[in-house]
Image (cartoon, grey):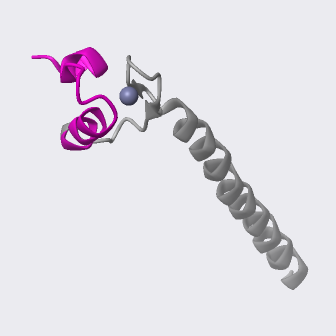
Amino acid sequence: MGGGNAQKSKTAREKNLEKNKAPKGSQLDSNKKAMNIQCKVCMQTFICTTSEAKCREHAEAKHPKADFYQCFPHLKK
Ligand SMILES: [Zn+2]
């Protein structure tokens, strides 16, 4: 009877291992997908959580002569 319990907990542990493995892989995938902000002037990509202020920083630093919305037209309201 005791053996039966041990086997159950072993299975539970293996299931937990599988659970721990899965998010790591999917997180890598979502990190790749998250690079969906792109400067249209130099084609540099930014993670989707990049704030508008950071985009402005990039535009001002890299393309002082270009219009901010030329770099990031998606931020135009
Ligand atoms: Zn740029």
Horizontal arrangement in the rendering, residue 30 relative to residue 71 (left or right): right
Q: Quadrant of ligand 1?
A: top left
Quarter of the N terminus within the rendering: bottom right
Give above or below for 8 relative to 23: below
Q: Quadrant of residue 18?
A: bottom right
Residue at image x 38%, y 24%? 39
Farthest front residue in view = 65
Farthest right residue in view = 3
Residue at image x 85%, y 84%? 2
Q: Position of residue 16 (x, y in %)?
A: 69, 63
Quarter of the C terminus within the rendering: top left
Q: Quadrant of residue 56?
A: top left
Q: Looking at the image, which is closer to me, 63 or 6?
A: 63
Horizontal arrangement in the rendering, residue 53 relative to residue 40 (left or right): left
Residue at image x 79%, y 69%? 8
**Count of marks overlaid on the render:** 0
Residue 43 in magenta?
no
Q: Looking at the image, which is closer to me, 35 or 1?
A: 35
Farthest left residue in view = 77
Q: Quadrant of residue 63?
A: top left
Horizontal arrangement in the rendering, residue 62 relative to residue 26 (left or right): left
Residue 71 in magenta?
yes
Q: Please tell me whether the stretch drawn in magenta is mainly helix, strand or loop.
A: helix
Q: Looking at the image, which is closer to me, 25 or 3?
A: 25
Residue at image x 61%, y 37%? 29
Q: Which residues are magenta?
A: 53-77
Q: Position of residue 52 (x, y in %)?
A: 20, 37
